[in-house]
Amino acid sequence: MNDDSDRPWRSFAVGVGANLGDRRGQITRARDLVAETPGVRDVRMASIIESAPVLPAGETSGHPDYLNSVFAGETNRTPRELLSRLLAIEAGFGRRRGSGCEPRTLDLDLLLVGELRVQEPGLELPHPRMWSRDFVVKPLLSLMPELRPAVASDKSGSTNPPENA
C-alpha cells in the first residue's frame, strides 16, 4: 500500500464471523491484523456474540454456529484497498470464497467507509444486507450508535454475494 498520508481519514466498519476452528482466537487475531494495517488506526472490537448460520430460504444445514463481532476504526485507505486487505487476511486463515453458505474459518465483510457510497463489481457500500442481520446490527451500533439505516433491507436480489458479502 502506498504512502497516502494526504488522504482524508474516514470511519470504517467490518463485520466479522467464524464458525470453524478456534473461532474466538481467529476473530481476535483478525482484529490485530486489521489494526496493524498501514493506513488504519484506532481499531475497536464490539463484544463477540453467537448466531446461527444464515442460509438460503428452504435450506437446512448442520453447519456450526458462528461467533460474530464488528471492528470499527479509521482509515485513509480507499474502500478497494481496505477490501483487498480484508480478503488477504481471510485467505491467511484458509478462507476460499465460493458460495455464501459454506462454513468458514473467517469472514470479513466491509460494511462501510465513512459516508461513501460505492457500487462496483465485488464491492458495495454501505453493505447491502448489514441492516437486516442482527448479528451485524447489534455489535455495529454498540461501536457506532450514531448510525441509522438508509435502507433496512437487501435490495440487491443477487444470489452471488459481492466479495464483501
Image (cartoon, rainbow, N blue to C red):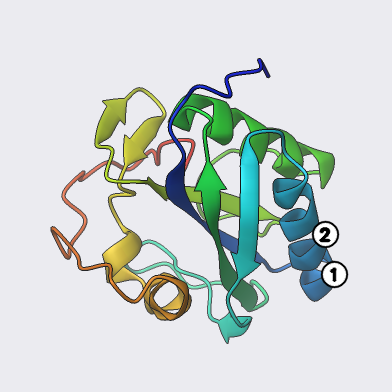
Residue beneath the point at 64% across and 71% down: 63
Q: Position of residue 3 (x, y in %)?
A: 66, 17
Residue beneath the point at 43% across and 70% down: 136
Quarter holding residue 44: bottom right
Q: Is residue 63 above or below residue 105?
A: below
- Per the image, label 1 sits on a secondary structure element best described as helix
Residue 71 located left or right of residue 19: left
Q: Are marks 1 and 2 in contact (CB under 8 Å)?
A: yes
Q: Position of residue 86 (x, y in %)?
A: 63, 40
Q: Is residue 29 above or below residue 46?
A: above
Q: Nearer the viewer, residue 83 or 23?
A: 83
Q: Position of residue 123 (x, y in %)?
A: 39, 32
Which of the numbered marks, if any, corresponds to residue 25? 1
User: Which residue position holds label 2?
Assistant: 29
Q: CA distance from mark 1 to mark 2?
A: 6 Å
Q: Is residue 97 visible?
A: yes
